[in-house]
Image (tube, helix red, strand yellow):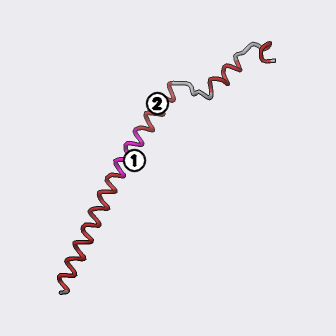
Amino acid sequence: MSTEYIWETFDSLFKTVHRQSTRVEELEARIIDLERRLEERNATTNTKPSAAAQPFNAVNEMPAERAA
């Protein structure tokens, strides 16, 4: 009886560890994907001026008569 209980406990523990390691691998893959997407976004942001910066630049380039 006690050896059966030990094997059931070991089996349950093994399944839990396997399930958790699978989840860790999935999370690591997700992190890698998110880091890649962040790098791509930063690369495209660095090549294009931001939308918030464009109106500010347009105001600075206006003639003095229009600004007043």
Q: Distance of mark 1 from mark 2, alpha carbons?
A: 18 Å
Q: Mark 1 = which residue?
A: 31
Secondary structure mostly seen in the magenta stretch: helix
- Quarter of image, res 4: bottom left
* Residue 66, position as x, y percentages in the image: 77, 14
- Quarter of image, res 21: bottom left
Horizontal side of 36 relative to 59 (left or right) equals left
Q: Is residue 16 magenta?
A: no
**Viewport quadrant of the C terminus:** top right
Type of amino acid under label 1: Ile
* Residue 32, position as x, y percentages in the image: 37, 44
Q: Mark 2 = which residue?
A: 43
Horizontal side of 27 relative to 5 (left or right) equals right
Q: Is residue 34 magenta?
A: yes
Name the residue rendered at 46%, 33% in the picture. Answer: 41
Name the residue rendered at 32%, 62% in the picture. Answer: 20
- Quarter of image, res 61: top right
Range drawn in magenta: 27-36
Q: Is residue 63 above or below residue 1?
A: above
Type of amino acid under label 2: Ala
- Mark 1: give few (<14), some (14-19) or many (20+) Cα within 10 Å: few
Q: N-terminal of the two: label 1 or label 2?
A: 1
Element class at badge 1: helix
